Image (tube, coloured by chain):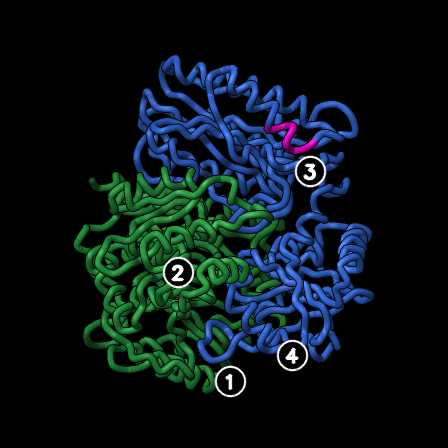
Chain colours: A blue, B green
Amino acid sequence: MTAPHLPFTMAEYDRRLALVEARMQTLGLDALYVQDPSNMAWLTGYDGWSFYVHQGVIVIPGEPPLWWGRAMDANGALRTVWMEPERVLGYADDFVQSTEVHPMQDLAAHLRARGVGTGRIGVEMDNYYYSARAHQTLMTELPDATFHDATALVNWLRAVKSGEEITFMRRAARISEKMVDGILDRVEPGLPKNELVAEILGDAVRGADGHWGDYAAIVPLLPSGVDASAPHLTWDGRPFETGEATFFELAGCYRRYHTPFCRTVFLGKPPQYLLDAEKALVEGLEDGLQAARAGNTAGDVARALYAALAKGGIQRTGRCGYSIGLSYPPDWGERTMSIRTSDETVLQPGMCFHFMPGLWMDDWGLEITESILIRDTGPAECLCDRPRKMFVKD
Amino acid sequence: MTAPHLPFTMAEYDRRLALVEARMQTLGLDALYVQDPSNMAWLTGYDGWSFYVHQGVIVIPGEPPLWWGRAMDANGALRTVWMEPERVLGYADDFVQSTEVHPMQDLAAHLRARGVGTGRIGVEMDNYYYSARAHQTLMTELPDATFHDATALVNWLRAVKSGEEITFMRRAARISEKMVDGILDRVEPGLPKNELVAEILGDAVRGADGHWGDYAAIVPLLPSGVDASAPHLTWDGRPFETGEATFFELAGCYRRYHTPFCRTVFLGKPPQYLLDAEKALVEGLEDGLQAARAGNTAGDVARALYAALAKGGIQRTGRCGYSIGLSYPPDWGERTMSIRTSDETVLQPGMCFHFMPGLWMDDWGLEITESILIRDTGPAECLCDRPRKMFVKD
């Protein structure tokens, strides 16, 4: 039986499970429990907005994964995962947000019943949704188990995208382009921000090139003027104003695959400091793209960017990009590789990043970014194809 | 200095802080660390999509709260919180998604510096975002501290809404009504689901009655036919079809306050079993609303509903509602009170619930719900005002 909504071929899911099992063997894990909804989806196809309760996927080598979650969501699992129905385990509703019992008691019972309750179990210690209490409960219930911190274990195996996944990234990129085009068409002084967001979200979900759009793991961010000094403010009902720069941070999403894409729009005549920053940033992006090639490291990309920015008088440090792909709220990053000088991960063909050197200064901000694919040879391919500049509407 | 975007009066923030300090005194807490973004916003006004990194609010009795988070988000805090700039603490970007250092090391240093590093510290053990690793790191860094499980401590203090908050709930309700009206106007056989979602999201964000709309903590859910057996599936690009019921689970949101509202639409001529279920469900809602009055318990509401459903031949158990108000993804519930037979919380005027007895059967589903406000006397007030029925478009 194949679930009706499966996005990938079974060969693709087999590939993924084989990667996880090989990694588990290296680490000597008897079982792996993944609560990250992105990892759940990547391994099994599961797709539903149910990650606000405890749920996860159990991998025991040599058998198909087990989906485990709230009983009412087991119906959703039956509609979306590739495993047989007996691999879908639901717990009673009494466990939900109870102060007396905890869902991890039910999970522990399943692990015991399957003979891995005293084994070496991987858990995602620093993942959203795997709470401190969840871990404590599991440790209490399985006193003879050994717990291994498997934070980002699956996430790392997602780093190099398959051909099927790259197809999804490209579809998401078409949606990102459409969103940016719609912004440029519509933004003007006096237009309330929320009115523009309504159009952006509509473009995102309508999709592009005949492919429907999914919800992105982060809502559009579009601060203006002084607010653009802060990277993560959302919107309100105030109008766009002449004389202000607004950056638009957004991502098209196709079946949970994201291609983030940011552009800045200035309404009116931009001040020289913004034009200077734009020039330095675009040169930095170009130098970074040249460095973003197989065999180089993530740190090489950051160094190329920062050298170009420094030539333009901008001292920037920290993270200027991250691995991207399949994701759920609250983050569209994969939370593995970062483009920063301390990250010496070697770039491989098929890796995808949001190259994201946002500038957030004391009283202004500028974002011009690219989602990139590392190629077999040569510099990275930009997944979106729109002018790399600050747009000015005079 | 008052932040430019503060949604409430200072009297309201003073009220909230006083509630938290009183509760801390009862529990003998020297400090409280809240990572739940809803609690952060409720206490300080902070509003930004930055909860995908570790951040929180520290409450030490007798002084204003401290906002603590990633340095780049400190700019957003300066734009949104009521405290003075020196109460905003940022950590270096190197801590973000690092395998070598953890942000909680920085938090621990602040707690030590403020003299509470060996005290009794409340932490939200079972909250999204406060990960198992976060807690382990904090315990390691503060070996002489005593940790108290403060899960939902602040959430419980949010249960009774102030007048200012009820105004926001009512604005959100106007948006919910507009979203449902838009669905009824537009849904028809052949319309792809994502096209309708584009309109729903547009209505949500455009807002109503002159008030802009915020993003809801959950995206619209609208499964049809057999998929409606699962409560938490999102959308795809398939068309609505004649002969299928679709439930629409959504919430208008005004400045993070949610008024969830669900209705079901049948395209064509509904089968008798759905009409029978509709009748039982509407009667159950009416009986539940009568029971939802100050002095009764949450369990009383569930019992009234289930008795009426049983008369209609429907055996339902589990949770059929939850406290609502201010929220961030991944959940628009407050995660305190549940409407279920085992919850004997006494209802008080000003409490708000989503009374949500969804029916998810083997191969169909039905949702007709109300967001309600407990009044001083009499049955609960429904915040939205639309016919309580399954809509049929023939």
Which residue is rendered at x = 50% and y = 52% of the image?
Answer: B187
In the image, is A197 to the left or to the right of A119? left
Tell whether label 1 touches label 2 (CB within 8 Å): no
Callout in the foreground (4, 1): 4
Mark 2 closeness class: few <14, some 14–19, many ≥20 residues within 10 Å? many
Q: How far separated are the C-alphas under marks 4 and 1?
A: 33 Å
Q: Say whether mark 1 and mark 2 are on the same chain.
A: yes
Q: Is residue B393 visible?
A: no
Q: Amino acid at mark 4?
A: Ala
User: Residue B392, how many percent across, how many down?
Assistant: 48, 62
Q: Amino acid at mark 2?
A: Pro
Please give the residue where the numbered disc 4 appears in the rendered image: A109
Which residues are drawn in magenta? Answer: A297-302
Please give the residue where the numbered disc 1 appears in the rendered image: B313
Q: How far separated are the C-alphas under marks 2 and 1?
A: 27 Å
Mostly what secondary structure, the magenta segment? Answer: helix
Which residue is rendered at x = 56% and y = 56% of the image?
Answer: A126
Secondary element type, mark 3: loop
User: Residue A320, how many percent across, how many down?
Assistant: 55, 32
Mark 3 closeness class: few <14, some 14–19, many ≥20 residues within 10 Å? some
Callout in the foreground (3, 4): 3
